[in-house]
Image: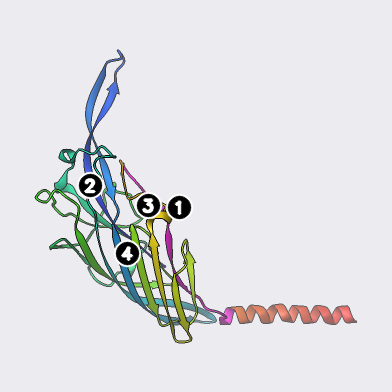
Amino acid sequence: SQLVEGPVMVLPYKTLVSQKDATGKISYKEGLTNIYLLPENLDISSKADPQLLKRGIFDAVVYNTRIKVAGNFGRLELKKSGINPELIQWDKVKLAVGLSDLKGLKNNPSIKLGDSVYNVEPDFSSLDLFSNNLIILPDLSALKHTALNFSFDLDLRGSSELNFLHLGKSTTVKIEGGWGNPSFTGRYLPENRKITPDGFTALWKMPYFNRPFPQQWTDQNTVLSKPGKEGSFGVKFILPVDQYQKTMRSAKYSILIILLTFISL
């Protein structure tokens, strides 16, 4: 199953850390932390094409989907958080997107940020934002601000479920699929849904008030993919009754009939 997360902008930030030696003398050492910024608007549209695969009496649902993501970041809040913009390392900014299973990627995605297009690469550094991080490294030293638009496409394969993470201050997600038995799962249910025997359409519109993440925060290392704290939601392509369930029901009814026969005698 696939969980699409992000994007999140990560800005390295210089700080001063106090240290006390054995004599009680206090000294200050320069450290490095991160500023995390979530999108102001996040619009996602996905069109899934589920297929049914069989092996013996077992059935499995797999799907191909093309996901379009667009939105924008706002400017950093400096006054309340006490951030000095001169201490931000604008040339080392990262934009991170998370994906639960990288094997499902069918193409090499690229992200458009502002007026520039960047190729995505996997991240193997100490950044633990998501379970699998796909990042770009835009150099914002000339702009020195974060009010930028972004957009990218994902061509994905997965099975059973397709989920998203509610990260935008205003998040809108639309999913279409040719499956007549969808089950909407996660923290949020769709605002509008239409289900027919041939397919379904679902629309989520969510503000940030019911999101388990702040809009901006400072931390050395943050993990957003914690179990039980995720603001994830999506659709599960369920099988109402498969061959395995029919076989199990037949076996249980046969036991019941045999027992009733002996009880009657």
Packing grade of label 2 (10 A; few <14, some 14-19, many >=20) is: many
Q: Which residue is mark 4?
A: 102
**Is 44 in the magenta?**
no
Mark 1 and mark 4 lie on one chain; the one further toward the N terminus is 4
**Is 228 in the magenta?**
yes
> Chief secondary structure of the magenta span?
loop
Q: Nearer the viewer, residue 159 or 114?
A: 114
Q: Which residues are magenta?
A: 220-244
Mark 2 and mark 4 lie on one chain; the one further toward the N terminus is 2
Q: Which residue is mark 3?
A: 224
Q: At label 3, which amino acid type do we have?
A: Leu
> Does residue 165 appear in this view?
no
Q: CA distance from mark 3 to mark 1?
A: 8 Å
Q: Of helix, strand and loop, which one carries label 3? A: loop
Residue 62, how many percent across, how many down? 41, 76
Q: Which residue is mark 1?
A: 229
Q: At label 2, which amino acid type do we have?
A: Leu
Q: CA distance from mark 3 to mark 4?
A: 17 Å
The residue depicted at 38 percent of the width and 56 percent of the height is: 208
Packing grade of label 3 (10 A; few <14, some 14-19, many >=20) is: some
| Image height of 211 relative to 160, above or below | above
The numbered disc on residue 11 is: 2
Position of residue 103 in the picture relative to residue 183 (left or right): left
The residue depicted at 34 percent of the width and 54 percent of the height is: 130
